[in-house]
Amino acid sequence: MEDIYKQTTNMLTNKEFLSAYREQPTSSDPAFKDLLVELGYNFERDKEGNLVNARVKPTENLPHLISVLDSYRHAVASAVTSNRYTGPGAMVLGVANEGKDVYDFLKKTKSTKGMSKVLGESWNDMYNNKVGRRFSGAKPDAMKAINKAFIEQLKKMDQDGPNFEFTENKDFKFTDQKY
């Protein structure tokens, strides 16, 4: 019974994907983290293991590191889950996961203050889940394709600056950007 509980918890919390950015899709492909370092992102950690530069942009036109990593986690989790449980199954799990996040926020704060921010982040997460499902596949294949899509988008954002044209249902969303 404990195994079923543990599997369900892992499925709903996406713990498997929290550090996906550090994994190489295949032995010959770089990890997403390495690709981000090439764009100027810094992964320095403090004594407690927290990312020191989580809320730092390498250039004015790029999103914060934490925003990129959160969007990436949702996209990869959705792509792999979609391959495992079909698209509708992945969609239900994604919505359930976001509902759990909102519930946890209310339980922790015992207040609705800040709820609009949490709901906005949840909408972004669900959007990235939807876009991530386009890359449905085994984990290595999904990660390789998503890495490529993310890096292309980030390079375009950096190059185009304020003139970057967001494409709905193709581009990923980052919580610290306006669309």
Image (tube, rainbow, N blue to C red):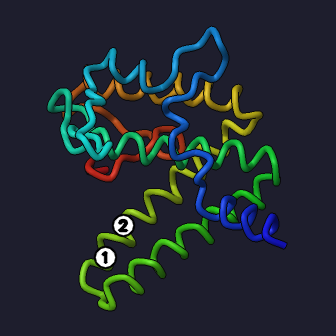
Q: Residues within 10 Å of mark 1 (few under 14, many from 20)?
A: few
Residues marked 1 and 2 touching at CB (< 8 Å): yes
Q: Amino acid at mark 1?
A: Ser
The residue that mark 2 highlights is 120
Residue displayed at 58% across by 22% down: 24
Residue displayed at 52% across by 46% down: 18
Which type of secondary structure does the marked residue at label 1 adopt? helix
Q: Residue furthest top?
A: 28
Which type of secondary structure does the marked residue at label 2 adopt? helix
Q: Nearer the viewer, residue 84 or 60?
A: 84
Across and down, in percent, residue 97 comes to 58, 67
The residue that mark 1 highlights is 116
Residue displayed at 42% across by 19% down: 34
Q: Amino acid at mark 2?
A: Gly
- Is the residue 7 above or below the residue 81 in the image? below
**Residue 28 as seen in the image, left or right of residue 5:** left
